[in-house]
Structure formats: structure tokens, C-alpha cells
Image: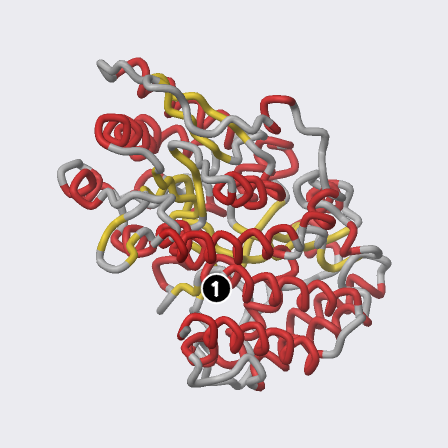
Amino acid sequence: MKKKTKSLIALLLVTVMSAVMVVGCSSNGESKEETTDKTAGGDNEIVFWNIGTEEVDKAIYDKAIEMYHESTDTEYTVTSVPVQNDTYKEKLVIAMSSGECPDMYINWSGGPMNEYIESGFAQPITELFNNSELPDRLLEASVAQATYKEDIYAVPFMNVSLSGIFYNKDMFKQYNLEVPTTIEELEKVSDTFVENGITPFALANAPKWTGSMYFMNLAARKGGLEPFAAAVDGSGSFEDECFIYAGDKILEWTEKGYFPEGVNSLSEDDGQARQMLYQETAAMDLIGSWYTGLIQQDSPEFYEKIGWFPFPGLEGSDVDSSIMIGTIGDNFISFNCEDDKLAAAFECATKFSEDEMVDFMVESGKVPPVKGVEDKLTDPITKSIMESANNASSTQLWYDQYLPPAVAQAHLDSSQELFGGTITSKEAAEQFQKAMEEYLSESKE
């Protein structure tokens, strides 16, 4: 196990370190609290790494921890250590590579979580989970994402996060535009904005995962989910026509001016994409549904101008256009502690799904993965997102969360190059497939 742990963490470390130069360019001036290297706490301290550096997420983390301290007769104190999103994975893996890891930490499930588990830095919580109220509270789909080899390793919380298109209703009305239901209609809408000097999409692609949303949605609308599943298990390939199509569309849309100048140098964490929306220099943004809370926090007045629609399907295609890209849970809390400390950390994590917290998150624009949450929603955008979630035949987890880290990085790198126009769709597919083949070969050794 020790040899396997080292090899897995080494692979993770190489992956995240390859992105250091990129994430370093998108720093937004973190506080000392956000850059602390503190990992595991002492005997009575539980250190909790998370990405709650900005409101409204910070308020959610703080409230859950406060509820734990106030309602639980415990000897443990939970210390929140927020880390900026773009550098979070890097810091977590570097800590693990040093044989350290916080007592509690958030992740996004999928391939990276599985490797944390295999490396010994996430403990099974199946018994604790089944003896709690969580089975009756949480959506089964979110629990499935927290499960690995029949054991539960994380507590899903925070949000049902799906990618979709936020748009400026006033700008659509100004140019007599209807919400598009096909990709062809979306292109006509985008062409109208370009003709009038407006950037169709507010994209900040320095972190790469933002641009990946376009690739994932386009590939799913062209080929469904089967080509992706086949490429991952080795029976298919990331050189399938649906991935070539996605790359071709990104190149075409970049050439037509659908994205801002210098798109690959713009920071999502610094809010540069949202600023384009607020300044009305861009009309739409394909992004995760967490934008509901962010925009409401930034500007409740501007939020009144915003609408939302799912990524449209291909005209005349028989591919299921109800498929959504995202997560049923968004953030997951895993644990690197044992015995009484593990029980205490788990108890803190359960606070996120209690009624008081669920109400607080809904009021903050979140859709926590709890049963019956749709009955609590009043915001029309959030209700539309949840309707799409409920109507979806299936939900594809973000590629960079589902795939093994090295393969995910190859995808992110090649996707960003497509937006920069420095690679062809065929070359991007070849890089993606090569990384997948290398991983499958190494995993058999």
C-alpha cells in the first residue's frame, strides 16, 4: 500500500504542478488565512480546508461550523482554512505528497477523490453515514458520487451545480432575440451580438475548466454520453467524431469573435467574466449554476436582468438534449482522521444538510442536494435549473473531476489551446487520447 500511495500521489503532484504557472497568474491577493499551510490539527482541533474565500460560500462554511460548535457537546474545535479555488487542488496534493493532509477537506468526487482514497488520505464513513439522518436527507444521486467500491467516503453538500447559459434579458429584448433551443439558433444569436459590437460569451479561461464547459456540452450534444464512457474504459477513443466536432466548434466560434480578446489570460476567480456581464460588454455566460448566488451577492439589481437556459441541442439530431453537465452535490467533504475525531468531523459535516442550513443556502442562491429542496425554491432561475436537473435523463460529471488527474489535465490543456487557436481539433483529440491510453496502460501494471 505504501508504494501505491507514493506512486498515486506522485502522479497527482506532477499533474497539479504542471498548472502552477497558470494558476499563479490568476491570484487575487489572498489573505494570510487563505495561504496558510496548516494541515492536521492537534488532539482537540479539526482543521477543515475549503474554498470559502468569498461570499456567499464563506458565510455558508462559517455558519455550519458555528452551528456545530453551538449545538454539539464536544471537546473538538473546527478551524476553517479557506484556500482560493484555482490553487486549492495544488495545495492539497502538495500537502499529501509530504505525508500530511487536513482532517477535513472538500473535493469534487470523481477521479481525484478516488486517488485520494487509494492513497490513504480519505477514510470510509459508511457506518457513520448509515447511522445518521443523512440517508433520509440527501439525494441518492449525490450519495452515489460520494461512493467508491461500495463504501461512502464523503458527504455531499453545497449545491446542485449544472452548466447552463446565463443571459441578459434586456439585451436579448433590445435586439429582438429569442432564447435559442438549438445550437444553430445559438449561433444566430451570437452573430447578431457580434454584428452590434457585443461579445456573445463572457468567458475567463485562465483556469481552463471554464472553457472546458463548452467542449463538454458540444461533445454531449453531438454524441451523447456513450463516446465518453467508451473512451474512458478503453473500448472507444477521444478521437471520436463528437470530440472533433467540439474542438471544431470552439475554433470556429473563437474565429468569429464569440469570446473576449485574451480569453486565456482572464481570471474567473477574480470575477472578470462577471464584470463583462455587469458592464454589458458581453451578453451570455456558459457557467455553473453557482452563478445565481454570486450575481445576487454582487448586484441584486443586475440579477433582475438575468435569465438562464440549458445548453441547446443540435437541430435534427436524435441525441438526447436533456443530458446535463455538472454535479449533484458540487462540493464533497472527505476526512483524514480516525475514531472520535472522525466522528466529530463527520458531525460537523452533517450540519450542512440540516433545515436551518438548507434554508440559508437556498436564500443565498444555492440548491443543496437534499430531498424536497425544490419545494423551498422561489427564485425563477434556480427553479429553472432544478427543473432541468429533474428532467435530465443523465448527468455527466465534469471531465476534470471524473477523469484521472493526468488525463483531466491533458484535456484542460488542449481545450485551452483550442481557445487560443494554437492547436487543431485533431491534435487536441490526439493529446487527450494519448493521455488516456497512458493511464490505462499504467493502471494495468
Query: Residue 88 appears in which quarter of the rendering?
Result: top right
Asked if one can make out residue 387 in the rendered structure from this viewpoint, the answer is: no
Q: On screen, 316 above or below 396?
A: below
Q: On screen, 250 above or below 345?
A: below
Q: Residues within 10 Å of mark 1 (few under 14, many from 20)?
A: some
- Where residue 202 appears, as percent x and y from the top left, is 72, 53
Residue for badge 1 = 403
Left or right, residue 192 beside residue 383: right
Which quadrant, please, contains the N terminus?
Answer: bottom left
At label 1, the amino acid type is Leu
Foreground residue among 190 and 122: 122
Image point (44%, 81%), residue name: 234
- Where residue 187 appears, as percent x and y from the top left, is 69, 72
How many numbered marks does the figure carry? 1
Which quadrant, please, contains the C terminus?
Answer: bottom left
Dot 1: what SS?
Answer: loop
Left or right, residue 431 beside residue 236: right
Residue ranking furthest to the left: 131
Q: On screen, 71 above or below 82?
A: above
Image point (84%, 65%), residue name: 195
Foreground residue among 311 and 109: 109
Asked if one can make out residue 286 in the rendered structure from this viewpoint, the answer is: yes
- Where residue 336 appears, as percent x and y from the top left, is 35, 37
Image point (82%, 71%), residue name: 255
Residue ranking furthest to the front: 3
Foreground residue among 220 and 117: 117
Image point (67%, 75%), residue name: 428
